[in-house]
Each structure stands twice: as C-alpha cells, then as structure tokens.
Amino acid sequence: METAIAVEGLQKSYKKVEVLKGVSFQVGKGSIFALLGSNGAGKTTTINILTTLLKADAGTATIDGVDVRQRPEQVRQRISLTGQFAAVDNRLTARENLRLISDLHHLPDSAQTAAALLQQFNLVDAADRYVQTFSGGMRRRLDIAMSLIGSPSVIFLDEPTTGLDPEARNDMWRTIKALAKGGTTVFLTTQYLDEADQLADQIAVLHQGKIIASGTASELKRLVSGSHITFTFATEKQCVAAKALLAKHYQVASDGVTLSVIIDGTTSQVAQLFAQLRDSHIEPTEFSQKVPTLDDVFLKLVGTAKEEK
C-alpha cells in the first residue's frame, strides 16, 4: 500500500510541558487510521502539526510525499480538516454553506457541486433549511460534506462523533467508511474505542506524548491474553466434574453451577473444549464467550506505561 502520511520523531512542547515526545507512524492511502488517546495525550496537537496549523519542534511529517514544514501551501491543497466542532454557518442554509465553500475554492459550478454533496450526504430534504435548525448529526454530515469540496486526498476528523446520539454515530460511521471506499485517506482521532474497532484499518495508541502500541484491532487485542468462556450446568455436581476435567489443561474458576475457563480464544481451542466435555458426557445448559476488547487493550497499555514510568 502506498503511504499517504509519514510521521517520524515528532516533538512539541509548550514552554516546559512536553506534549509530543518523538511520535512516529505511517498511514496507507485510502485507509482509515485511528489515533487513540486520553484527553491531553497529544492527539489534537498531532493533527494541528499535520494540517500546518502548528509547527513541530523536531521531527518530520509528509502528506503524499510533501513535507508539511517546508511546503505547507502544497499540503493544504491536499488535505481537509474537520475539527471537534462543526464549522458551519448557522445563518445560511445547507445549500448556501456548500456553495460558499465551492466559490472559495473557485470551482466552476458551485450549484452542481452543492447538489451532488447534498445527495451524497442525505441532506436533500434539508437543503434549503437554515443550519441552526439542524440536529447534531445533520450538522456533522454537512461539515464533512463541506470538507470534501476541492477533492482532498486526505481528510482529518478530530473527534467526529463527540456529542452525537447512537443513531447519528452510526450514520457518521457509514459516511466515514464510504469516504475510504471512495479512495480518501481518513485520519481519525477518537476517545471511543468501539469507534476505532468498527472503522480503523490501523490504530495507534498515544499516551503522554508517545505511541505505546500500533497495529490492527485484532493485533492489538492479542496483547491481552486469553478470553473467557463461561459454562452453566444443570447441577453443581456437573460443574464440579467439569472443573476437575478442564483444570488439567486450563485456568478455571467455579461458583455454584457456573464455571469460567480462560483460553487463548482460537476457534480450535474452543472446539477442543466442547469436545472434552462431550466425550466426558458433561453437557452445559448455557455458555457465553467474552473476548478482549480495545477497552481492555487500552487499559492494559496505559496501566503498563504508568508502571514503567
């Protein structure tokens, strides 16, 4: 995959406070990249540097091979930024907002551009309503539509679903996936780990100015050992028998008629577990499996980083 964003050794301090301490990562073209981190981790500072709003103290960053520090004007022609708060004019309609930005980009037919984006972002019915009457989700969709004017190759979305209700969040997720499917590189910052899990091709975890882990969601989840399978049996006697059988190979814990088994989470091991119970004529009445989530990964990584510090 070609590289859309390349970052190496970014450093940034405000007076004596180090915000970025040598941040490095790469983002492939047409992919969705999620930068995770708590408040104050340095996510917005990273975006501000990559979008030429802020200069790094050290390190390099390129967008489509163009150096952010040395050629900021060329970088701005390739990117678009949607911040944490929708940058729309409440006193204009959705159509007027889109036409205004089209005119600022000197596009030949702003009316046609606005009509196409209204259709793409499901805003046709609200095209001539004032934006001040819009819901949070509609404002966000309009904001991203405006960001796509000029056909940027990379779009930065800083906390795009903050404050949205679940339905509006799902709509936004579909919009973001569609952007990447159309070839746009999406750089996403979020505090919602389920959002990164749903959307991102690659994830980096930023903690106190450093990248402490990176990879796909599946790769990161493997950093947390094991998953849990919980069995419920008809009688306590069956549970005791199952515990005696499985404790030879697994870490187990029981409580009454319930038995919890820690396994590596692979399909083959799950199948083996059921086969052992079947061959011993021990049949559970219910079972459930809990696999590691990105929340588990994040808590473990941050906890480990604090201990090392």
Image (spheres, rainbow, N blue to C red):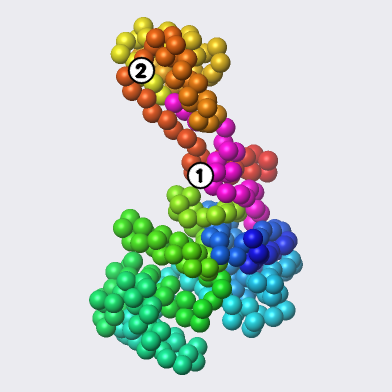
Name the amino acid, label 2. Pro
Q: Position of residue 204 (x, y in %)?
A: 60, 53
Which residue corresponds to mark 2?
284
Q: Is residue 21 magenta?
A: no
Name the amino acid, label 1. Leu
Q: Is residue 152 left or right of residue 230?
A: right
Which residue corresponds to mark 1?
294
Look at 37% across and 89% down and name the residue there.
Answer: 111
Which quadrant would residue 20 be assigned to in this image? bottom right
Q: How many marks?
A: 2
Q: Position of residue 209 (x, y in %)?
A: 64, 56
Q: CA distance from mark 1 to mark 2?
A: 29 Å
Q: Is residue 92 left or right of residue 307?
A: left
Which quadrant would residue 165 be assigned to in this image? bottom left
Point out the stretch of residues depicted in magenta.
209-229
Q: Is residue 215 magenta?
A: yes
Which quadrant is the C terminus positioned in? top right
Q: Position of residue 89 (x, y in %)?
A: 37, 82
Looking at the image, residue 170 lies above or below residue 266: below
Q: Is residue 109 visible?
A: yes
| Nearest to viewer (mark 1 / mark 2) | 2
Look at 37% across and 80% down and name the residue there.
Answer: 116
* Sequence-first disc among 1 and 2: 2
Looking at the image, residue 305 lies above or below residue 79: above
Q: Is residue 158 visible?
A: no
Which quadrant would residue 127 be assigned to in this image? bottom left
Question: Mark number for residue 309?
Answer: none
